[in-house]
Amino acid sequence: MTAGADAIVVGGGLHGCSAALHLAMRGARVLVLEKDTVARHASGVNAGGVRRLGRDLAEIPLADAAARVWHAIGDLVDDDCGFQPSGQVKIGETEAEMAEMAARVERIRALGFAHEVLIGADELRERLPAVAGHCRGAIVVDGDGHANPFRTTQAFHRKARALGVRFLEGTAVRDLARAGGAWTVDSAAGHSQAPVLVNCAGAWGAAMAAKLGEPVPLSAEAFMLMVTQPMAPFVGPVVGAWGRALSFKQLGNGAVLIGGGHRGLADPDANRAGVDVAGLAASARTAAAIFPVMRHAAVVRAWAGIEGETPDKIPVIGESATAEGAFHAFGFSGHGFQLGPIVGRVVADLVTDGATDLPIEAFRIDRFAN
Amino acid sequence: MTARPDIAVVGAGPAGMAAAVAAAEAGAHVMVFDEQPGPGGQIYRAIETPGPAGDAVLGADYAAGRGLSRAFRDSGAEYLPGATVWQVSPDREVGVSVDGRARIIKAGAVIVAGGALERPFPIPGWTLPGVMTAGAAQIALKASGLAAADAVFAGTGPLLYLIVDQYLKAGVPVRAVLETTPWSAYLGALPRLPGALLRAGKLRQGLGYIRAIRDAGVPVIRGVSGLAVAGDGRAERVAYTHGGHRHEIAAEHVFVHQGVVPNVNLTRSIGCRHDWDPAQACWRVATDAWGATDVAGIFAAGDGAHVGGAEAARLGGQLAALGALCTIGRIDAAVRNNRGAPIQHALAWELRPRPFLDALYRPAAADRVPAGDDVVVCRCEEVTAGEVRATAALGCLGPNQLKSFCRAGMGPCQGRLCALTVTELLAEATGRPPDAVGDFRRRPPVKPLRLAELAALEPDDTDGGDAGP
C-alpha cells in the first residue's frame, strides 16, 4: 500500500499534471498514476496550439481565462513552455465563408468577447505575405499562439513534483472501490487510498468513468501531424482555414508543422497510433493551396497521438454524477492543450471548494446519460 | 506502372535481385523498387556500368555480381530504378516516389531488402569536412572513379581493408591505416576460429588484402584507440593512442569505418519486432527461417535483416522469395521446404565464419559510446553525448523520451546515424541492457517526401484493393 494521499489523479498528461499541481498549491497531498510515462500520448505530441480562436461557445470563458494564465505561464510553472504569442489566423477562401466568419465574430461579440477580429484581404496579405492569392480574409486573434507541448507538460510535471506530488509511471489502474469515505485504487503499485479521485485519463478516460457507472461514448482518435525540413521563415502566426481542416505553423528552427484534424489509426489497447496516407495527402493539399511555397517543402516525419473525442466535441469536466469524491477532466477532443492551465485550477476549485467561478455546466458528464 | 503486384521487393542489391529472380521464376508478378539508378545495391554498385575503376580495381567478388544482375534483368521482374520507398504500411501498401511522382502500390507480400549502413563512428571531429565514411569513399571510387590521395583510413572490419586495397589498385596513395580492432577482440575471436577455418578461403582473402597494403608501403598501425580528428574548420590531422602514447598524423581526408549494421528504419516504421543482437551490437528485425517478420506478409532479407555479406544476402533473398510465394499461395509449404532445404544448407555453410568475424570486428565499446561529453552524437540536431547523459540523469529512460527532451533523433535521418549510439549511451547511463532501453520509433515517411508529391496523391492512388492472401 502506498502512503496516504488527499487525492489520486489518474493520468499523467497535461490535465493530470495541471490538476495535481493546482491541488498541491492548495496544500493537498497528491498521487498521480500514469500507465505509461508522463506526456506519452496526446499531451506530448499535439500541435501545441494556444488558441481561443474558433472555440465552441461553451469553451470560450475557459479559453479566455486560460489565455491570461498562458501570458504569465512562467509565474505558474517556472518555465515559459516555449510559448510564442505569435497570433492565430483562420483564413476564409470564399465570400460565403467570409460571411459565415463575420456572423461568428458578431455572435461572440454579443456574448461579451472581443478577441476574435475579422480582417480583409489586404490586411491578411500584410500579416501573411506568402498566402495564396485566392484567400479573402481571416479571423485573427492576437495574443494566441503556440507552445511546445512536451516541454509544457514536463514543466507542469516538474513543478508539481517540486510541490510534493508523487508520480508513479508505468502504473495502470486496475480497479476502483469506495468505502468509508475513501477511494481504494488498485494498480501495479498496489492499493492506494485517498478521499478524492480525479480522472484525467484522456482517451482512456471513458474506461475510468465506466468503472464509476457513468459510461461516456468516447472514441479514441489518432490526430495526425507532419513536419517538414527547415525552410526560410515565411509565416509567424498559427494558420488555420475556415472551410477545411488545417493547423499550420512554422517553428523556431524553420520546420513547418502541419496538422488540423485528419485522423490516423488509433489502437488505444496497444498504445499505438498509425498514420493514414490519404489523410496526410489531404493535409498536404490544403497546406499547398494556402501557402504555394509549401509545394517545395520536404516532409520528414508524420505521426499521430491518441486522444479521446466526445460526440459533441467538448470535454467532460466536473464532479461525477454517480460517485462521491470523484471528478473528471477528459475527452478534450483534440483541443485541450490551451485549456490545460485553467482546467487544473477548475478541478482544484471543485475538490477544495465544491464550486468554481467559471461556467462548466456544458461539460457535465451526465449530458450523455439519456 | 501496373499496380498490385504479387510481390514487391524494396532494394536491388544481392538479396533483392535474388528474391526477385526466384519469385519471378515461379510465375509471380514482381515489382522491384530501387533507390539507385541501376541494380547492384551497394556491393555491386554500378555493376552494369562500371566506372573508370573497373573490375581489376574492384576485384573478383565485385565482378561476380554481374551474373546475378543479368539474371535479374532477364527474370521478367518489373524493375523501377530511382524509386524512393518512403513508406510500407503493415497491410503491405508501398508508398514510393519515382520521377517526382508519389504512388501507393498494394502488394500481396513485401520483401524488404534495403541493405545495411555503416555503423556510426562518433569520435571528436567526425563532423568536420574532410571526414567521411570509408563506404562513402568507396562509392566515389565505384561510381565515378573519384578518390582522394593521401587519406588516412581508420577503424575496423573487413570492408576497411578491402577499400584500402581498391584505392591502392586504382593507384591512389594512402597515408596510413589506423586499425582500432581491440587486442581483446583477437582473444575473444580465437575460440570461434575452428568454425571459420572451414571457410579458410574467405579468411585468406582478408589476410591477402592486409599483405598487399603492407607491401605497398602503407603503414598499418594496429591496436589504435582514442581516435580524434582536429582542424580549423576542416580535417587537418588525426590523433590517436598507440603503445601508451598519443600520436598525430597530418591528413586532410580521414575515412572512418567500423563495420556495417542493418538499416532498420523501414522495418521499424512498419512495426516489425526487432531484437538487440549482442554479437554485432545492433538491432535486427526478428524473422523466421524464410525471412518472415511478425507482421503478416512482410519479409526481410539480406544485410538489412542480418549482416552476413553478399553471398548470404543472395541466399537469404531466395529464401524470402519462397516464403513470400508460400504466403500468397503460389506454392505450398511442401514445395517451399523442398526448394528451400539446399538453400538453407548453403546459407548455414556461408555463415560459418560469422561468429569469428563478429567477435573479431565488434568495435571497441569506447568507439561505439563516446567517453567524452563534447562528442556530437546526433548530427542532424547537433546533440552531444554529454547532453544525452544529462537527459538520462533527469530521469529520461528511453530514446523516444530523449527525442522530446533534447531533439536527438528528430532530424531528417530519423536516427539512422545516431540510434545505436543513443541506445548504448542510455544503456550505459541507466545501467540497463540495450533491449530494455529500446530504439527510436521510426515514422513514415522514412525518406523525405516532397509535399507537392504527397498532395498529388489522389484517392485512386491510395486505393486499398486487396491483392493479398
Image (cartoon, coloured by chain):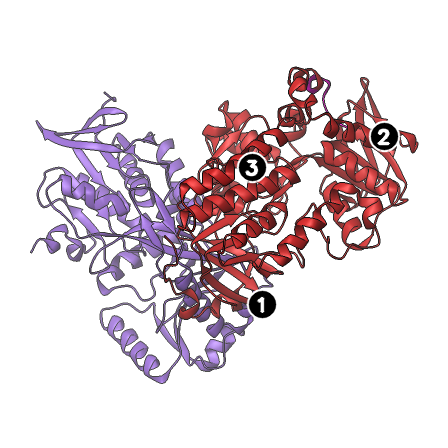
Chain colours: A purple, B red
Apparent side of residue A140 relative to residue B21 in the rendered image (left or right): left
Residue named by callout 1: B100
Amino acid type, callout 3: Ile
Between the C-alphas of marks 3 and 1, the distance is 39 Å
Q: Residue at x 32, y 50 (%)?
A: A266
Instruction: Depth check: give the residue in front, A114 or B252.
Output: B252
Q: Position of residue A245 (x, y in %)?
A: 36, 67
Classed neighbour count for the residue bearing mark 2: other residues with Cα under 10 Å, few (<14), some (14–19), many (≥20): some
**Mark 2 or 1, nearer chain start:** 1
* Label 3–label 1 contact, CB within 8 A: no
Q: Residue at x 56, y 47 (%)?
A: B113
Residue named by callout 2: B248
Indicate whether residue B319 is drawn in magenta: no
Q: Secondary structure at mark 1?
A: loop
Question: What chain does badge 3 belong to?
Answer: B
Q: Magenta span covers which residues?
A: B179-185
Amino acid type, callout 2: Glu
Residue named by callout 3: B343
Amino acid type, callout 1: Gly
Instruction: Depth check: give the residue in front, B182 or A69.
Output: B182
Q: Position of residue B381 (x, y in %)?
A: 60, 46
Apparent side of residue B183 relative to residue A355 in the rendered image (left or right): right
Q: Secondary structure at mark 3?
A: helix
Question: What chain does badge 2 belong to?
Answer: B
Q: Secondary structure at mark 2?
A: strand
Let me know if marks 2 and 1 both belong to one chain: yes
**Mark 3 or 2, nearer chain start:** 2
Between the C-alphas of marks 2 and 1, the distance is 47 Å
Q: Residue at x 23, y 27 (%)?
A: A5
Q: Position of residue B466 (x, y in %)?
A: 36, 59
Determine the image quadrant of residue B124.
top right
